[in-house]
Amino acid sequence: MKNSIYDFVVTDLKGDPHDLSQYQGKAILIVNTASKCGFTVQYDGLQALWEEFKDQGLVILGFPCNQFKQQESGSADEIQEFCRLNFGVTFPLMAKIDVNGDNQAEIYAWLKQKAPGILTPDIKWNFTKFLISPDGVTIKRFSPTSTPATIRPWVQKVLGIGS
C-alpha cells in the first residue's frame, strides 16, 4: 500500500503517465467526474477554485468515471472538448477509470481506505471529492452534494490561507 498520494502515477486523458510526485507539498482535490450528471455544473465551481488557488498550491484532478448510470460514456477527446467548451476547464483531467469494484483504480482503493465515507467505503456517485493536504496523507472526503463553494474554506485551511 502506498504511503502518500505522491506515490501514485496515474494516466492522463491523453494516455500519458501523470506522476503525482510533481505535486509534492501541494494540496490536491480529486474528483470523479461525469459529463451527463446532475452535478456536472460543479465543473464551474471546480474551475473557479482552481483559478483562485492554483498559484497558492492547490491542484485539482478530475477522474472521469462511467460507473454511475453511464453518465460519462464519451471518448477522451469528447470528454476534453465537453469540459473545455461548456465549463472552460483547464485543470488536469485523467483517463476514465472505475472508482468501485474489481477494476477500480488503485488510487481510488487508497483514497477510500484513507477516507471511507459513511456506511460504506464505496463511492456512491459522481463528483465525490477528496481533499488531500500538502503532507500527501491527510484526507477529507466530501459527498457529491458538497459544492466546490462549500469546500472552499477547507481548501483555504489546508493551504494555510485566511478567509
Image: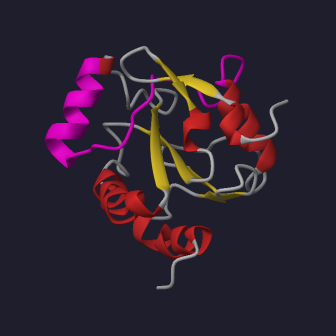
Q: Whole-percent x and y of residue 47?
A: 31, 54
The overriding secondary structure of the stretch rendered in magenta is loop
In this view of the protein, which residue sits in the foreground, 55 or 71?
55
**Is residue 24 among the parts visible in the rendering?**
yes
Give the residue furthest to the right. Answer: 1
In this view of the protein, which residue sits in the foreground, 1 or 98?
1
In this view of the protein, which residue sits in the foreground, 19 or 151?
19
- Identify the coloring: secondary structure
In this view of the protein, which residue sits in the foreground, 138 or 34?
138
Say which residue appears at 62% left-offset and 35% top-offset. Answer: 21
Q: Quadrant of residue 78?
A: top left
Q: Whole-percent x and y of residue 43?
A: 32, 51
Say which residue appears at 21% left-offset and 48% top-offset. Answer: 87
Q: Quadrant of residue 49?
A: bottom left
Q: Which residues are magenta?
A: 77-105
Residue 98: in magenta span:
yes
Give the residue furthest to the bottom. Answer: 163
Residue 46: in magenta span:
no
The quarter in which the N terminus is drawn is top right
Q: Whole-percent x and y of residue 34?
A: 39, 37
Say which residue appears at 31% left-offset and 37% top-offset. Answer: 36
Query: Residue 138, relative to residue 85: is it above or below?
Result: below
Query: Residue 44, relative to residue 112: is it above or below?
Result: below
Q: How many marks?
A: 0
**Is residue 122 among the parts visible in the rendering?**
no
Q: Whole-percent x and y of residue 23?
A: 56, 43
